Amino acid sequence: MDELEICYMSAGALAPMIQSGEISPVEIIEAHLSRIRATEPVLNSFITLLPNEALAAARQAERDIRAGRYRGPLHGIPVGLKDLFNTGGVRTTSGSRIYDTFVPAEDCTVAARFREAGAILLGKLNMHQFAYGPTGENPDYGHMHNPWDPNLVSGGSSGGSGSAAAAGQCTITTGSDTGGSIRIPAALCGIVGLKPTYGRVSRHGLTPLAWSMDHPGPMVRTVEDAATTMNIIAGYDPNDVASVNLPVPDYTVALTGDIRGLRIGVPRQYLEAPLDPEVREAFNTALSQMESLGAEICEVDFPQFIDAAPISTTMLMAEASACFRDVLESDGQLLYEPVRLRLEAGLFISAADYLRAQQARTVFDRAARRLLDEVDLLAGPTEPVTAPPLLQQQVLAGEQEIGTVPALTQYTRPYNITGFPAISLPCGFSAADLPIGLQLAGRPFDEETVLRAAHAYEQSTDWHLRRPPL
Amino acid sequence: MPDDTPISRQAFDESAARLGITGTESHMEELFRQVQGVLAGTASLKTISVSGTEPDMAFSSSGSPSE
């Protein structure tokens, strides 16, 4: 089989071939290593690549499967982890040279679950330093580049995960999302990114950014692979104080293709915010498509939307500065200047203001939950713009020029405040051939409805089948 | 004339010293600019009615809807 075809196959397509022996994990890993060698000079998706370890694991997987010890749908599947997921025996930098030689003794819970499932770790993926930015900037390990146009950002903070999945460097990647860091690169790179409900996937062994808003989750090329990955990584973990002990369903069962009668609300305020006309058109076309599949689309009123920015910014900055205060004091001069400035600025937020933001969070959360009494899902564009150029400080969204950071987090941060599950999936391309993302958010711990709707829409379009020109 | 900025330069310098923040003149100037923006954002929280609302000190997504 052609190596490039292997690299663009989903885990769902590869798994039965691996199980039957039609394809070997060794062949899959070799194909991906070739793809990485060919594209990495342009993309810079990886901080640490593990070719020898991955090939050794693939040979072991091949032996195990031949001996009848097939472990399930991720056995032999190439995975890349954002470099803030601790991996036992493999350095974990959090995107900073301060931790260039840090080698955790143990896997984080997510990495351990991938390992138990037989997935093969190809390497650790590049990220915005300390996950503190939505653009994928990193002077220590090099900036990340968008596979659709390397002059543009891949998005952040999980930028290496977005570019690696989009370019066929990995079948499955992971990200963490505090203000949009899974969904932003997913939208800008044209892949699927799921931020699960807060407490659904363990944060144990991940470098925190803001404890109350950090969410790990899958970044993949198909909704089915997001569901399959969730089957492995979701679930209670006593090592994470935020982990919630609720049963985990088989998420793939939810992928029925049937969204008849599903009520999807579009907050009026989303479309009144700065928004590129091409994104608006793609979003409206996606809504029409879901309506044609039987969903009921309606406008809802969410006036609290404008409060998302001050609430999330205050909480994020205060918590991040608390998380990294020791690093700031000991090694502040080694930090990327914009990250250092943000961390220092957060120290000026008073305890009273932080608690005010927490009070406002409760008000915001209640309002959002009331909306989900009226409808099953909330829909909007994931991003108001397509990928902007690297290091550009302002973007044009419709007729308004706004800061790149507030623009890229405009639609994502509300669901970090509420903790609702939210997915981004491709819903079109701009005239410049840049991906556009659709965001669907659901009730807490109802990832099934989010995945069901996303899958039905995805399968009725071919946006997810497009490949970047690499 | 009243100063309508969220924090004066003198108050910023005193707070920075108390927090142990030091840097070049250009670094401190940029930090001052950013702190102005951050504090303007926190000030805008005052426009949100939160009377009678306790902060969720242990945030959880598992609370019941519409409470």
Image: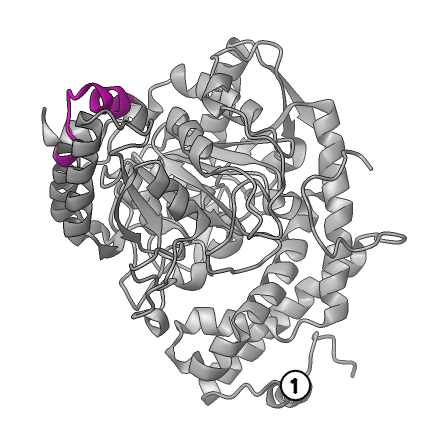
Say which chain tag 1 marks.
B
Which of B5 and B44 lies nearest the eye of the viewer? Answer: B44
The residue positioned farthest toward the right in the image shown: B52
Which residue is depicted at the point 30% across and 70% down?
A100
Q: Is residue A107 above or below residue A12?
A: below
The amino acid sitting under disc 1 is: Ser
Q: Position of residue B50 (x, y in %)?
A: 84, 53
Which of A178 and A445 lies nearest the eye of the viewer? Answer: A445
The answer to which quarter of the image holds residue A126 is bottom left
Report how many numbered discs are placed on residues in the image.
Answer: 1
Residue A302 in view (yes/no): no
Which residue is depicted at the point 15% across and 38% down?
A59
Residue A15 falls inside the magenta stretch: yes
The magenta segment is A13-26
Q: Which residue is mark 1?
A: B15
The residue positioned farthest toward the front in the image shown: A67
Badge 1: residue crowd in 10 Å (few <14, some 14–19, many ≥20): some
Residue A123 falls inside the magenta stretch: no
Which residue is depicted at the point 67% across and 69% down?
B39
Q: Position of residue B4 (x, y in %)?
A: 74, 75
Dominant SS of magenta comes to: helix
Which of A323 and A111 lies nearest the eye of the viewer? Answer: A111
Q: Is residue A360 left or right of residue A165?
A: right
Q: Is residue B66 left or right of residue A167?
A: right
Which residue is depicted at the point 19% across and 27% down?
A67
Instruction: Name the image quarter holding the C terminus of chain A.
Output: top left
Q: Is residue A302 left or right of residue A167?
A: right
